[in-house]
Image (cartoon, rainbow, N blue to C red):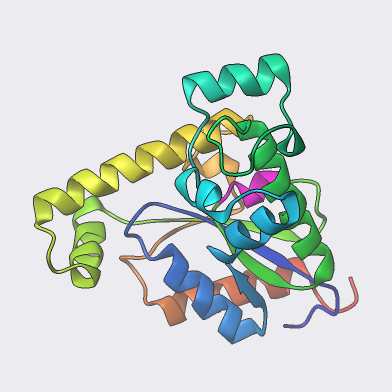
Amino acid sequence: MNSKQPIVITIGRQFGSGGRELGRTLADAFGFKYYDKELLSEAAKRAGMSPEFFERNDERAPTFLNGIFSFSFGFAPTNVYAGSTSISDDSLYRAQSDFIHSLAEEGSCVIVGRSADYVLRDHPRCVSLFVHAPMEKCIDRITSRQPELTREKARARAEKINRLRANYYNFYTDRTWGAASSYDLTLDTSLLSMNEITELVRLYLDKRFPVNK
């Protein structure tokens, strides 16, 4: 990259659109670090919570009871047993957000999901992407990874996970998941290869962050 200053790329994505694949491709091409599921275990360690709890609640909006506990009583991670589902969801979100901020301070990286674009909205060198594709193309990708799934089951899973991601993002931010206005770039992965999309992103970064700017 032309820029000498750290850059953070965040990727929101529809399920099956290839967001993680694009994230890894970008990270490899630009020499950036890549973070996805790693955010969960590391944030859990730092917050003193069980990684299993993080995994179960990954990109999930607060449940009814947890939402009440979280925002009415203000439970913190140190107030309850680390494996309990009564841990407040906003404490979990804060722990993950704190870790995202720490990653952005350490150097250039690609972060997939977890509303990282919103968490880093004040970061001067954060580029937010949203990756999508027609549902049939997403189903093709899902069934290629999991051939045991029928297309009907793959569609149902994609719709469910997209709904969960949208609820999570819309709950914790003042933006709309998947809306073009919420991101710097939105990309349809059915139209170009991952390498071609990577070159488009490279051009965007070079134009937005020229040398020594």
Task: Evaluate whether residue 77 shows in this view.
Answer: yes
The answer to whether residue 69 is above or below residue 140 is: above
Q: Residue at x 14, y 69 (%)?
A: 147
Q: Is residue 157 left or right of residue 178?
A: left
Of residue 177 and residue 71, the one placed in the foreground of this image is 71
Quadrant into which the N terminus falls = bottom right
Q: Is the magenta stretch mostly helix, strand or loop?
A: helix
Of residue 78 and residue 118, the one placed in the foreground of this image is 78
- Residue 28 image position (x, y, % from top left): 57, 84
Residue 203 highlighted magenta (yes or no)? no
Q: Residue at x 74, y 32 (%)?
A: 79
Of residue 84 and residue 148, the one placed in the foreground of this image is 84
Figure label count = 0
Q: Quadrant of residue 30?
A: bottom right
Part of the protein shown in magenta: 114-119
- Residue 37 image position (x, y, % from top left): 53, 63
Q: In this view, does 107 lie to the left or right of 113?
A: right
The answer to whether residue 194 is above or below residue 14 is: below
